[in-house]
Structure formats: structure tokens, C-alpha cells
Image: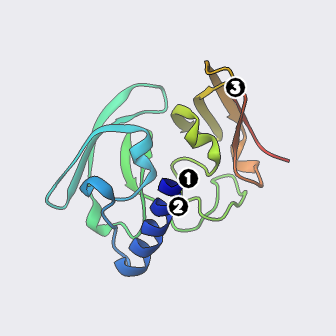
Amino acid sequence: MRRVIMSAVCAMVCIFLAGGTTCLAQGGLPYGSYRQTCQNMRVDGNKLFAYCRKADGGWRNTSIDYRSCGGEIINDDGYLRCGGGDNRYPGGGNIGGWRGGLPPGDYKRTCQNMRVNGNKLYATCQTVNGGWHDTSLNNFNLCQRPIANDNGNLRCPK
């Protein structure tokens, strides 16, 4: 819990001090949700390189000049992109703080291989007995609250 709080504080300070530029998080990597679905990430000068998961489950080498991003960097179907700034789901729902990439929710703590394809969120989530379950959530963009892992199933809380 302390680590989560420290990460949140660091992110807020980063946003406040950055003045429209992307901050570097721990490990010298720019801030963003891409870190959950990419690997072999490295920065060389002003360029971020990574090997990122595509919506179909495959992988792609990608890079971005992160200096021009005003916020977080996201994985968009295997391509690194600057996150949008409107905090809205593509389908019109609204959960403050979501900027593309993966939608908000504590499911990120107990799920892996998370990805979005259209309005469908896919993940492999941990069950209460410690096993793993492949799951998906249709029309996640209509959720009015952050998404949760309910015993290995992605759920839109009521």
C-alpha cells in the first residue's frame, strides 16, 4: 500500500513540475500505462523503445519520441502513443483519469496480459484460490466506475 501511495505522490509531483512534458518514472522510463503491456523497454536520448503486446496477442517492436507527450504514454495495439487528454472512454463513458491504454481499476493489481481491442477489455486474472482465469469485459467503455477483478472475472461495479 505504501508503494502505491508513493507512486501516486510521485506521479502528481511529476505532472505538477513537468509543465506539459512527460516525466521519467523510476528506472528512467517515461510515465504511462504502456509499462503494463510492454517489455524490453529502454530510453536512448529522447526516444523510448519497447516490445509491446498487440490486441491480437502478438508482439511488436515500437518507439516514440516521448518529449512531445504532455502526459502518459500508452500502448495502442502494439504502438507507443501519447495518451489523450480528455479522460473519456472512446465510447463515451467517463471515469476521471483515464487517458487511453487501459481503463482504470484495481484489476490491474491482480491481472496480467491486459489489453483492449475496440470496446472489449481482455486479461488473465487471479482467482481467490490463486489460480488464473482468462476473462474479458464487453463494452467496458460504458462502465461508470473503475473496473474490478471479481474472483478471476473482470466486472463493472454497480
Residue 55: percent from the left, percent from the top?
Answer: 49, 32
In terms of secondary structure, where does tag 1 sit? loop
Q: Are marks 1 and 2 in contact (CB under 8 Å)?
A: yes
Q: What's the residue at 53%, 54% (across, down)?
A: 100
Residue 133: percent from the left, percent from the top?
Answer: 63, 20
Label placed on residue 128? 3
- Dot placed on the residue nearer the N-terminal end, 1 or 3: 1
Q: Inspect the image, locate mark 3, and give the three-letter code of the amino acid beneath it.
A: Val
Q: Is residue 98 above or below residue 19?
A: above
Q: Inspect the image, locate mark 1, and give the three-letter code of the amino acid beneath it.
A: Met
Q: Is residue 154 above or below residue 47?
A: above
Q: Is residue 69 above or below residue 120?
A: below
147 lies left or right of 67: right
The Cα atoms of the two marked residues, 2 and 3, are separated by 24 Å
In depth, the one of 112 and 63 nearer the eye is: 112
Label placed on residue 1? 1
Number of labelled discs? 3
Q: How many C-alpha atoms fall within 10 Å of the one at disc 3: few (<14), some, or many (≥20)?
A: few
What residue sits right under mark 2 in the picture? 5
Q: Are marks 1 and 3 in contact (CB under 8 Å)?
A: no
Label placed on residue 73? none
